[in-house]
Image (cartoon, rainbow, N blue to C red):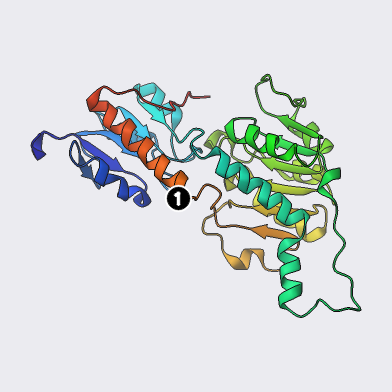
Amino acid sequence: MSESDKPGVLIADPRMRGYAAGLSDLFTMADEPADDVIAVISGPQGIVDAALIARLPKLRLIATPAAGLDGIDLKAAAARGVTVTNGGDVHSDDVANHAVALALAARQQIVAGDSVVRGGGWRGDKMPPIRRSIAGDRIGIVGMGNIGRAVAARMAAFTPEIGWWGPRPHDHPWPRHESLRALADWCSILIVCARGDNDNAGLIGAEIIDAIGAEGLFVNISRGHLVDEDALIDALKTGRLGGAALDVFAQEPTEPARWEGVPNTTFTPHSAGMTHEAFAALAALVISNVRSLLTGGELRNIVTPG
């Protein structure tokens, strides 16, 4: 196939440029919207909104390696008949492992304990901080998709008290609470695993944060825009929330000054799914889906709007 005959692929998230090597034999890589673009590769930093979709008359596929879909206008894509695919459950186990690690690190005071040892605060005449046992916690999970189910299965090794909430009932071993507020009232650790769609923005507001309580822990491995971050910071500063363990933030990278003086926090830099194995599998998935447009292969992990 000559270069002039190759259709275009637009890279909407610059971090995905490495995928070009697996596609250059069938496609040309476009840096800007063009009439010949039939696929867009996006990612957590990519924006594929209605305006961009309208500028791509031949667009057939939006592919992202992420599980979250923030930045992709699913309704505009559906209206145009454009298929959207995501990472699905490819890295669900890694993200779930990270969610549990964050919850354990916060409850077990791992970071604080490390600081005590390194800072010379561990002395024979001083007891280390007494912590709350996770065995007595009630785990509330927001969103019981691939990641939520994986988190629940892992947390069941620590406590039998597991519940969840999502907008639609599903048959799971764990009870579904009647509302997000009811789940927050019941649990002592709330772990957000909900899909990171723009429609879920602001899902966790001040009312939900306060309901978790002064002894409670909030964990987020989904997307930062699902949470009212100002309300979260205020609740931590005033002691209305016991602690937070976050892998995602409203703005990324988050500014360190924003968290100055905010107590009882454990952070990682949006790295829950960042393993060598997951990256390789996700890249292969995206490349396979885009290539399938020309080779007639099956598209995997098609996203259904809503």
The image shows residue 205 at horizontal and vertical percentages of 70, 43
The image shows residue 41 at horizontal and vertical percentages of 34, 40
The residue where tag 1 is placed is 276
Three-letter amino acid code at disc 1? His
Q: What residue do we see at 59% from left, 39% from top?
A: 201
In the picture, measured across the screen, residue 2 lies left or right of residue 235, that is: left
| Residue 231 visible in image | no
Q: Is residue 187 above or below residue 299?
A: below
Q: What residue do we see at 62% from left, 45% from top?
A: 97
User: Residue reaching furthest right?
Assistant: 125
Number of marks: 1
* In front of the other: 194 or 211: 194
| Residue 102 visible in image | yes
* In front of the other: 10 or 200: 10
In the picture, measured across the screen, residue 143 lies left or right of residue 133, that is: left
The secondary element bearing badge 1 is classed as helix
Res 11 → quadrant:
top left
Q: What residue do we see at 65% from left, 21% from top?
A: 168
Res 93 → quadrant:
top right
In the picture, measured across the screen, residue 98 lies left or right of residue 188, that is: left
In the picture, measured across the screen, residue 245 lies left or right of residue 249, that is: right
| Quadrant of the image containing the N terminus | top left
Task: Count residues near mark 1 (Cα–Cα under 10 Å), then give few for <14, some for 14-19, many for 20+.
Answer: few
Q: What residue do we see at 74% from left, 32% from top?
A: 180
The image shows residue 170 at horizontal and vertical percentages of 66, 20
The image shows residue 230 at horizontal and vertical percentages of 67, 54
